[in-house]
Image (cartoon, grey):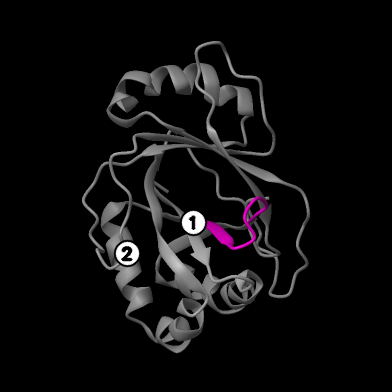
Amino acid sequence: MDVIELRQYRLRPGRRDELIELFDRELVEPQEAAGMTVLGQFRDLDDPDRFVWIRAFEDLSRRGEALRAFYFGPVWKAHREQANATMLDSSDARLLRPLRPITEPGPRPPVGAPDPGGLVFAFLWSFGERLAEVEGTMLDEVVPLYGEDALALATLEAENDFPALPVRTGDGHIVVIASERVELPGGVPEPRVLRLAPTGRSLLR
């Protein structure tokens, strides 16, 4: 999996559980059948109207193919009005690449599985044009602090070949998805932190 999307949706007040129920029941397997992997679905614990999720693609060319297959296909057509009705903004999306190999977690819990409890953190550093300068240091000195199972990602500068879904550009992000906070070395800036609760069918938990 060489291409990762981190997506944060701002929802209409009080409708997050409605979207999660629909997503976990109807939209996971069809996306994977189209050629992507849904890695994680989360409630943002600091924003009751934000849904955060992560999906992966084998490579950039397959991303476009998979997105066209899903969003132009019958499942999204059947459910898009209900899904879109819960959303105020779905444009906060980052296109990322893994900084170290990703092992796909699994197996996925069935539809209706209870939320697992626990907490997942997403740590986001924005270095802008300095990303290339700091990436090696972050990978060598910061990412290992979060453990072998942490997901370590960086901004992928590439043309968005599915413009119907915009992605953010110019952030120069390093992103770590991990199960706990750590003490950072001196000189490393504090990241933005998302405190996330996995849904019942999230692989990342």
Q: Residue at x 33, y 49 (%)?
A: 168
For the residue labelled by badge 1, is the local secondary structure a helix, a strand or a loop? strand
Q: Which residues are magenta?
A: 44-53
Q: Are marks 1 and 2 in contact (CB under 8 Å)?
A: no
- In primary-sequence order, the first of circles 1 and 2 is 1
Numbered circle sitting on residue 8: 1
Left or right relative to 96: residue 40: right
- Within 10 Å of disc 2 (Cα), the crowding (few <14, some 14-19, many 20+) is few
Disc 1 residue type (three-letter): Gln
- x, y percent for residue 31: 46, 70
Query: Where's residue 94, x and y in %?
Result: 39, 49
Locate residue 58, reporting x and y percent: 38, 53
Looking at the rendered structure, the secondary structure element under dot 2 is loop
**Which circle marks residue 191 in the picture?**
none
Nearest the viewer among 195 and 59 is 195
- x and y, in percent, of residue 77 in the image: 40, 86
Q: Quadrant of the rendered structure where residue 149 is?
A: top right
User: Who is closer to the viewer here, 46 or 24?
Assistant: 46
Residue 45 magenta: yes
Q: Which mark is residue 165?
A: 2
Q: How many marks?
A: 2
* The quadrant where residue 18 appears: bottom right
Q: Is residue 35 left or right of residue 24?
A: left
Q: Residue at x 28, y 68 (%)?
A: 164
Badge 1: residue crowd in 10 Å (few <14, some 14–19, many ≥20): many
Q: Residue furthest top?
A: 186
Q: Amino acid at mark 2?
A: Leu
